[in-house]
Structures are given as structure tokens and as C-alpha cells.
Image (cartoon, rainbow, N blue to C red):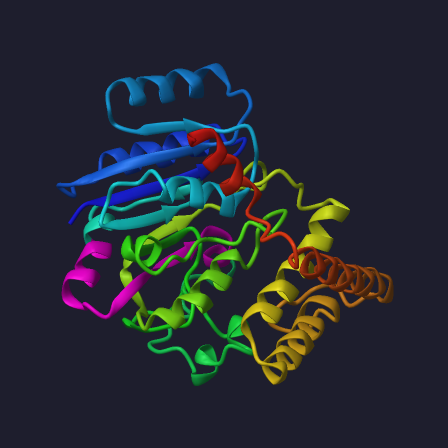
Amino acid sequence: MMISVVIPTYNREQPLRDTLADAVKQNYPNFEVLVIDQTRSHESETQVYLEQLANAGKIRWFRVNWASLPGARNYAMRRATGDIILFIDDDVQLPDGFLAAHADCYLEKPDVGCVAGRVFDRMKLDLSGGDLAIEYLPPEAMDAGIAWYFIDLVHTVKPQQVLSARGCNMSFRRLIFADCGLSFDERFAGSAVREESDFCLRLRSTGFKIWYDPNACLVHLGEEGGGCHDVSTRSIEYQVTFYHNHFLMGLKNLTPFECLRFFAKLFDCHVLGNPPCYKSRSPLKIITRFIFYILGFISVINTLIQSLWSDGQIYTRQDNIQVK
């Protein structure tokens, strides 16, 4: 079973080099590594390293002049040759056997269309001390209206069906894209938060399951700079698109009742700062976050109005024109 490992990257240097070093030395017998590079200019050390890997046939290196995580995923999907397409971030550490763990799930479970791997977030592990292990997720983790505050792929230790995957460690059967016609929604802007959740919710219509396997694990470093997008996390644009993307995912995929519960939980957690978000409860911070919440909702209404005449897949459309 051939695996295509896809690494979208934007303005990452040393973390990207370390990720690639782990990826190319995997002991799985049949895989390729695709780097979708959205960085305009690399440091000389990174540039030389990428050229060496590409010239040696260890990676397929694609450079694009735009920055969009869902756009990069779609771009790679059209070029990948594997039976399985595996997406990882550009700031992860991969153990030996990582690819094999993903492949085994598909070989053993023909009804699985997506494998969600375990994600050890460096920051969360440091804060928890590593002693918050749970066996099975609570029932709420399969409730699309509130699941997003109960899905914990850091500490869950038993294989099981789940509702969604983490974008830094998820794989799909190629036929999900080729035969079922699914693609990532390029209207998810900024950091593209929730773009993978949106895709996983739409995957349910194919009849395939999403299977969580803790053996398919990696460490996510969570570097603050760079990444797969071009918006600073401290910017006003990031804050607005954060809420925009949550609203977009809900309005696209959830029932009206599920939307109400989801948006209420979004407000309670991210605006008021209640657990599990644990944000500052100062009145000024709450008012500021509430303003972004409202602006995000206005922004998504504008997105949905524009969707009446455009599907928003601007990078896919641009790529198709270039190919022609």
C-alpha cells in the first residue's frame, strides 16, 4: 500500500528540516514525500537541504506563490500517487513505524476512510506532566454540536471511532478524493482552523469511518512562527478568521439545533474564557473577544452570500487553469 506523505509549509526553517529528516528515514517500504512550499524565500541552509532532498529523489518539492492550508492540501491531493494520503505539519517529530501504523489501520479495517493519529502537543504535555491518560472518549465526543470540546487526541490511549482528526496527523484513502469527490474548503481563511473538522464532517456522507489509532502518533511542536498560513496569531485578522471559520464549519454541516449548541459553547469557552479554554476573565478581554466573535459572524455571512456565485476554491481554480 503506497503512502503519500504531504507536508504543507510556510516560513518554517529548522523545524521543517527536522520534520523532513524524520519523514525521509521512515522504514515503511513504499512511500513518497510531497512538500507544498508556500515560503517566498528560505534561509540558505534550508534552501540547500530541500534542493539536496529533491535532487536525490527523496522528496517531491512544489513551490507555490500563495499561502493557504486547505489550498495546499488540495494541490497535493491532485499530485499524490499513493493509495493513502497522509497529512502532517511542518513542525512535528515522527517516531519509527509512524507510516506503518497508519497503513495497518486500512489493511485491517476496510470500512475506515480516515485514520486520526495520536498527537502529543509539546505544550500540553509540559503542562499536564503526562498523567492525564484516558481510555475512551466520552459520548459527547461523537456529538457534532459539542464534540470539539471533548475530543482529546493527546491523552486517549485506546483505538476507537472518532468524529474528527487533527490536521497535523491524519490520513485518508485516496478514493475519498478521487471517487467521492471531496476536497478541502479553501474558504477557511487565516490559520484555517477547523478546515480539517469541516472535511471530516463531510466525510460522514461517504459511509466511511474515522478511526483513531494511538499507535499512529507524533509530537506536535506548535512553533509560534511560520506554519501553513500567512496570518500572525496576534493580528486582528487572525482573531476574526478564527471565529469566521468556526461559524462556517457549523453552518455548513450542523443542524440548526446543533449550531445553537456549538455557537453557545464557542461563546462560553472562547469569549467568556470558561474551561476548557481557561482564558483571561478580565472585562476588557471579554469585550474584545466578543467584538471579534460578532465580526467573525458578520464575516461568515458575507462568505455565504459570496458562495451564491462562487465556491471559493480560488487556489484549485488557479491550479486547474495553469495545468490546462
Figure check: 198 above or below 123: below
Q: Is residue 45 above or below residue 127?
A: above
Query: What residue is drawn where x is 43% and y is 64%?
Result: 200
Q: Quadrant where the C terminus lies?
A: top left
Quarter residue 103 falls in: bottom left
| Residue 323, percent from left and from top | 42, 31
Tally of numbered discs: 0
Picture coordinates of residue 255, whole percent (x, y): 57, 80
Range drawn in magenta = 101-126
Task: Please state if 61 lies on the left or on the right of 38 as rendered.
Answer: left
Residue at image x 62%, y 49%? 189
Q: Quadrant of residue 19?
A: top left
Residue 80: x and y in percent read 30, 40
Asked if residue 238 is among those painted magenta in the image, a careful observer would answer: no
Q: Return the residue nearer the eye: 184 or 212.
A: 184
Q: Nearer the viewer, residue 145 or 226?
A: 145
Report whether 150 appears left or right of 94.
right
Residue 114 inside the magenta-drawn segment: yes
Residue 50 to residue 312: above or below: above
Residue 268 vertical position relative to residue 11 in the rendered view, above or below: below
Residue at image location 25% in from the left, 41% down from the top: 81
Q: Please state the horizontal and vertical placement of residue 70, each as a whole percent of the image.
A: 50, 48
Q: Say whether residue 99 is left or right of residue 276.
A: left
